[in-house]
Image (tube, helix red, strand yellow):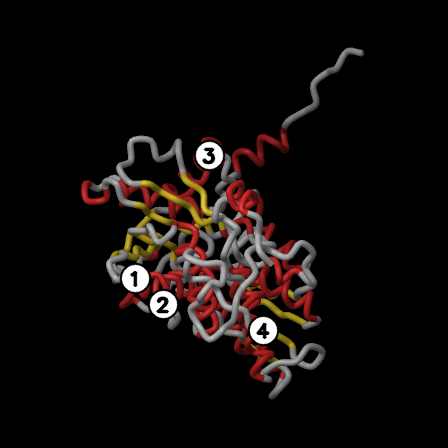
Amino acid sequence: MRVPALLLASFGLAYGFLATPAGVSKGIRPAASLSRAGRVGVSSLSMHNLDHPKIANDITELIGRTPLLQLNKVTEGCGAEIICKLESMEPCNSVKDRIGFAMINEAEKRGDIKAGATTLVEPTSGNTGIALAMVAAAKGYDLVLTMPESMSLERRVMLKALGAKLVLTPAAMGMKGAIKKAEDLVGELGAGKGYMLQQFNNPDNVKIHMETTGPEIWEQTGGKIDVFMGGVGTGGTITGTTKFLKGKNSALKTIAIEPSESAVLSGGAPGPHKIQGIGAGFVPNNCDQSVIDQVVKVSSADAMAMARRLAKEEGILCGISSGAAVHAALEVGNTPEMKGKRIVAVIPSFGERYLSTALFSELLEDSKSQVAEDVKL
């Protein structure tokens, strides 16, 4: 289907000429060139429609092709241009929708799992679990998720609303505790009945970002990108996206973001922090450190402060790790060598699932205590 020029002019490249996980599942090739209507992609896949389907067959067809947004107010005085990749606009509002689809879809194609016969099990800090629950519901799988008890209440409710069974693990054990519990549960289910998707080690995690997120950013920026920045949770986003982008431009710089309280990428010790979704306390196998040029540490306090600013000043309601990404992007963008450069940072998730956390705790309490005012008729 050819998209009218007027429509593309109205919406820009935010939704045009972009790859989608659903496209990959159907043998459709991600776009890699703006030069012609018949787009050439990054793998042995075929051509790809230019936008989301007008009527999707299921929720997974709406994953991917998220827009880019230029920041204006919080970046005032910054020498670099800072662009955000709004993964918060995925169907279940996080970048993990991509890997939730990819890991299940690829396992199905290999014959490793089958709806109605296999129980999926996965440790999660919340967003991957929500994505898996969405896809599992659409495809008819039973899903058991293990999650540290420190993750937000909204995450718990969302997981259960989507039909997943949730098992909480001690907060002090972090993701290591959730991983161990998931492994135990798979063992209890018995051979061939339980299947752990292993987001931290699963190569399909990296692959989907190479095939979709990277090509999308390249298309949307017209290849004009100097720095790519993202937080490290599983390492899939930063590794896969970077491998595609550096394949297009070897001079591109990739900067990883981690909590200063748990700076393991920088050689520090793991520790508790409040930036949910990144800083797992270990270096995941999916994180290829050889493609990372620099690591920036951001404190939980600074991450939350920036997330609040993004909501109030830019109208971007996002999570704590999104605040960390923009805080780090500003820190990098304000250095002399970044003047006139373009930085693209990932906004991993939407802010509504953080309302009960420290990010919005004051607003939550204020809203609870607010009383109705008198109205004279």
Residue 98 visible somewhere in the drawing: yes
Q: CA distance from mark 1 to mark 4?
A: 30 Å
**Disc 1 residue type (three-letter):** Leu
* Residue 334 percent location from the top left of the image: 25, 39
C-alpha gap between disc 4 and disc 2: 22 Å
Helix, strand or loop at mark 4: helix
Circle 2 — which element? loop
- In the rendered structure, the answer to whether residue 250 lies left or right of residue 318 reads left
- For disc 3, the marked residue is 314
Q: Residue at x 27, y 68 (%)?
A: 290
Q: Quadrant of the C terminus?
A: top right
Kind of residue indicated by mark 2: Cys
Task: Classify 39 as above or below 257.
Answer: below
Query: CA gap, disc 2 to disc 3?
Result: 31 Å
Which residue does the numbered mark 4 point to in the structure image? Answer: 105
- The crowd level at tag 1 (other Cα within 10 Å; few <14, some 14-19, many 20+) is many
Q: Which residue is mark 2?
A: 287
